[in-house]
Amino acid sequence: MVLIAPAFLWFFVESMHPAKPQVLPTIYEAGHFFAVPKTRDGQRLKLLVDTGGGGAGGMYWISTSAAKRLHLKSIACTADGQHPPVVRLPDYKLGLGLPPPGEVPCGAALLVFPQAASNYDGQLGAGYLPGRTWTFDYPAQRLTFEGDAWQPSALAHRSPLGFPHNAKGTPSSGFARITIRVDGQPLDMLLDTGASSFPTPDAARISGTPTVEGEGVASYITTGTLERWHKAHPDWRVVENVDEKVAARPLKRIIEVPEVEIANWSVGPVWFTEQPDKAFHQFMAQMMDKPTEGAVGGNVFRHFVMTIDYPHEAAYFRCVSGCKPVVTASLAH
């Protein structure tokens, strides 16, 4: 989750799948997927694939500086009475482009957001990814836009996803809620492939978090839940002064949870980075079907091949390493 999304979040959903699966041009850095499409004149974009990130109207977004670098032409666009900056799509090289946006209010276009990202040009976020099926193969570091014939693996476990819906019953936001279990209790979380941290060298060493240009992958937890965990389990490690990003202060703690259950798989230990309660109970709650207690990110997903089936509001997790099936009471007898 990178909270520099545009304020406009109108949303359209259309089920869109190619005839055949398409592997996106991608690089993988410190637990994050970046789409790296190439234009016909040799320009490249670096776009964070962030299920918890911004976008609107079926479109992804790029920074103003990236739009200028690619000489993309502005077009007029009005939706829901708003006038966001919108430009023409880049002319991508055959086989090195991205699936076009779906049915959007301004035709084949993408958003421009004035705030530059830290080390990338924009995001494929919650305004663009829904309506399709995507497989994040973390061990193979491969991202696939699935085709019409996609079926879940028999080895994968299904987890339902929650989305807010409008009066017509269609999703009104692309931010997915997933339920995990910690210490035997269910926790509603944002499914967030873009969750990031900026650990100090000591924090990176203690938590085993790889970083690129100081940025690493994370999962988030609210202050209130962290405090409850710490009180109930004083033996769970808590490390202070862990984040070098000024915006994170004074919230500087991480907590090590021995075991996390997701889609009836058990993984652990998992480090969670503290976030203020209002970030999820208030800000993100406006765009989700119910308030969440944080976000689950790539330090959990790294064990899996994870497929997000937006049209059917479900995610599938196939364990590759470092996880084991949860033995439920029904299976134990």
Image: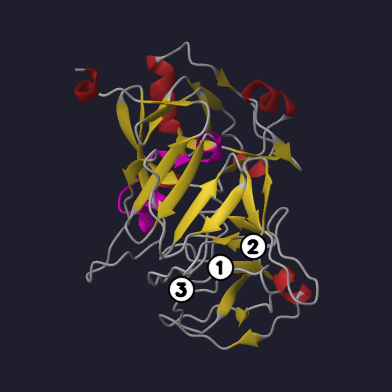
Where residue 187 is drawn, which disc sits there?
Answer: none
Q: Residue at x 50, y 34 (%)?
A: 300
Question: What secondary structure is found at the residue carrying circle 3?
Answer: loop
Give the residue pinned by disc 1: 60
User: Which of pointers 1 and 2 lies earlier in the amino acid sequence?
Assistant: 1
- Label 3 packing within 10 angstroms: few (<14), some (14-19), many (20+): many
Q: Secondary structure at mark 1?
A: loop
Marks 2 and 3, how far apart at CA: 16 Å
As drawn, the label of residue 122 is: 2
The answer to whether one can see residue 304 in this image is: yes
Image: magenta residue range: 281-302
* Residue 121 drawn at (x, y percent): 69, 62
Pick the residue in front: 265 or 70. 265
Q: Are marks 1 and 2 in contact (CB under 8 Å)?
A: yes
Provide residue 139's location: percent of width, then percent of height.
59, 39
Under mark 2, the amino acid is Gly
- Residue projecting furthest to the bottom: 76
The answer to whether residue 35 is above or below residue 41 is above
Mark 3, residue position:
57
Whole-angstrom CA distance, mark 3 to mark 1, is 9 Å
Q: Is residue 295 magenta?
A: yes
Hey, what amino acid is under mark 1?
Answer: Tyr
Gap between marks 1 and 2 measured at Cα? 8 Å
Earlier-in-chain disc, 2 versus 3:
3
Q: Quadrant of the C terminus?
A: top left
Residue 235 sits inside the magenta stretch? no
Say which element carries label 2: strand
**Image height check: is 233 above or below 115?**
above
Report the side of 9 relative to 144 (left or right).
left
Q: Pick the residue in front: 137 or 266.
A: 137
